[in-house]
Amino acid sequence: MIKRKWQINGKVHNIQFEEESRLLDVLRDRLGLTGTKEGCGEGECGACSVIIDGELKLGCLQLAAVLSDGTDILTIEGVEKTALGKRIQKSFLESNAVQCGFCTPGMVMATYYLLSNNKNIDRRTIKTALSGNLCRCTGYRSIFEAVELASGRK
Amino acid sequence: MNIFTPSNIKELFEIRAKHSNAVLLAGGTDLLAQWHNNKSHPQKVISLSGIKNLSFVKEEKNYVEIGALTTHSVIAADRTIKKLLPVLSYAASTIGAPAIRNMGTIGGNIANASPAADLPPALLIYDASLILASQSGNRELKLSEFFRGYKLTALSDNEFIYSVRIPLPPADIYSEFFKIGTRRAQSIAKVSFAGLIKKDKKGIETIRLAAGSVAPVPIRLYETERFLQGRILTRSVISSACDIMLKYLKPISDVRSTEEYRKFALKNLLTRFLNKA
Ligand SMILES: Cc1cc2nc3c(=O)[nH]c(=O)nc-3n(C[C@H](O)[C@H](O)[C@H](O)COP(=O)(O)OP(=O)(O)OC[C@H]3O[C@@H](n4cnc5c(N)ncnc54)[C@H](O)[C@@H]3O)c2cc1C
Ligand code: FES
Ligand code: FES
C-alpha cells in the first residue's frame, strides 16, 4: 500500500492505495469522486481529464504512486464550484452541448484549462484545446459554441 | 507491482543495480496505455519523474540540450527551441492533444522507438545525439545509430537517456515538418517527413531528410540526400530524387495497399518540400 497526502479540490486528503493504482482509480474508488470518467483507459478519449499541479492530464495514464505528497489535484467536482466552472456548465446547457453527458466532465475540464490559461480564444484554439476529448453523441459544433459562449466571445 | 521513486540520479543507479529488470517510467503515456491494453504490468517500475533536474532546455554555444524528462508542451512553447529548431518545436506541437503533450516526454518518445513517433524525424535532420548515462559514465550516441530495428534500441540494460543534444543548424536554411494522418488512423496511413536544406549559387549545399512510419524505425534518407547534394533543383531532379528515395526505402511490413499508400504519400511530401525550398 502507498500512502499519500494530496490537496484535492482545495482540501487536504490522506489516502492509501495499491502500488499499481492509476489516479483515475484512486479518485473514483477511494475518494468517491466519480465525476471523472473512464472511457477508453488508454489516453484516446479525454473522459478522465483532471488538472494536476496546474496542468491538464489524464487520470487513466497517471500512475498514482508517482505523485508525491503535496500534489495539487483539481477534478470536475472542484471545478464546478468555481465561478469559471459554473459559467462553463451554464454555457454547455444553453448551447445544448450535452446529450448523454459521459464526455461532459472531460470537456468541461479541458475548457476550464483553456479559459484559465488563455486570453485570445478563437475557433482554432478551442479545437486544439478539445482535440483530446471525444464525444459520441453531440455534434462538436455545439460543444465549440458552448466554449465560445463561456469565453465571453459570443 | 513494486514502484521506486528515486529523487536523484545516484539513487536511480543504486536501484537499477539491485533491480536490473525494473522498467523505467517517464510520462507513462505509452506504458500505461500498453499495460491497460495487455491487462498486465511489470513487477518492478522505476519512476523518473521525481528526478527534477531531468527536465530542462539549455542553450550552449554550439548546441541546444534538452533533458529527457522535458514534455512536448514545454518543447513546443520554448522560445529558444522555436527560434533555433523550429521543426522540432512544430513536431512537438502536433503530438496527441494538450493532456498528452503535458505528460509525454522527449526521452519516452525516443526510447519507445516507434516508427511513427514524431520527434525522431525532426531530431534526425538536426543531427541530434543522445547522452546515455549509466553508473560507469556517460556516452554520446548519434540518434541515427540509436534505432536498431522495430522497437529495438542501442540502449544497454543499465543505461537511460539523460538528454538530447542538438547542434545548432547552419544559418539561412529552409526546414519543414509534415505529417499525414493521425495516430488513431496509424494502421491505415500515417507518414511523417522532415527536411532541412541550404542552397547557394552553385546548388544545394546542405540537405538532410528524414521520415517516419515508412520503415521499421525512423530513418534518414541518406541516398536521396547524396543524390541531391550540389544539384540545382529542377523538375527532373526532383522526380529522380523521389525515384531514388522509393528505391532505397525498406518498406514497413504491413498490408500491401498501405505500403503503396505510404510510398505515394512520402513521394508527395518530398516533392512538396523540394518545390517550396
Ligand atoms: C492518445 C495518445 C496519442 C499519442 N499521439 C502521439 C503522436 O501524435 N505522436 C507521437 O510521436 N506520439 C504519440 N503518442 C505516444 C506518446 O505520447 C509519446 O511517445 C511520448 O513521448 C512517450 O513519452 P512518455 O514520457 O509518456 O513515455 P513512457 O510511457 O513513460 O515510456 C515509454 C518508453 O520509453 C522508456 N523511457 C522513458 N524515458 C526514458 C529515458 N529517459 N531513458 C530510457 N528509457 C526511457 C520507457 O521505459 C518505455 O519503454 C500518443 C500516445 C497516446 C496515449
Ligand atoms: S479514459 Fe482516459 S483518455 Fe479515455
Ligand atoms: S454527450 Fe454523450 S459522449 Fe458526449
Image (tube, rainbow, N blue to C red):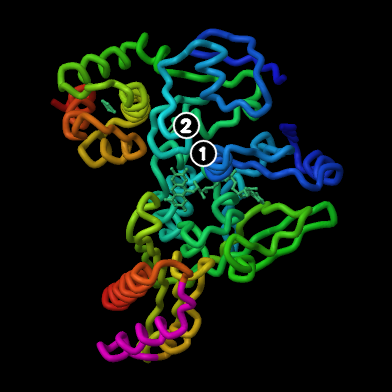
Q: Quadrant of residue B32?
A: top right
Image position, residue A141 (x, y; %):
17, 34
Q: Which residue is mark 2?
A: A58
Magenta span covers which residues?
B231-251
Image position, residue B71 (x, y; %):
52, 44
In contact (CB < 8 Å): disc 1 and disc 2: yes
Badge 1 marks a residue whose secondary structure is helix
| Residue positioned 32% across, 35% down in the render | A134
Q: Is residue A122 left or right of residue A50?
A: left
Residue farthest left in this picture? A154
| Residue positioned 26% across, 34% down in the render | A120
Q: Which residue is mark 1?
A: B103
Please state which amino acid type lies under the numbered disc 2: Leu
Q: Is residue B219 left or right of residue B185?
A: right
| Residue positioned 36% across, 38% down in the render | A132
Image position, residue B98 (x, y; %):
40, 39
Q: Is mark 2 within 8 Å of ligand 2?
A: yes
Quadrant assignment for ligand 2? top left
The verdict on a common chain for dots 1 and 2 is no
Please state which amino acid type lies under the numbered disc 1: Met
| Vertical relation: B53 (above or below) B106 | above
The residue closer to the viewer here, A26 or B197, is A26
Q: Is residue B247 magenta?
A: yes
Q: Is mark 1 within 8 Å of ligand 1?
A: yes
| Vertical relation: A129 (above or below) B255 | above
The residue closer to the viewer here, B182 or A8, is B182
Q: Is residue B150 left or right of residue A38?
A: right
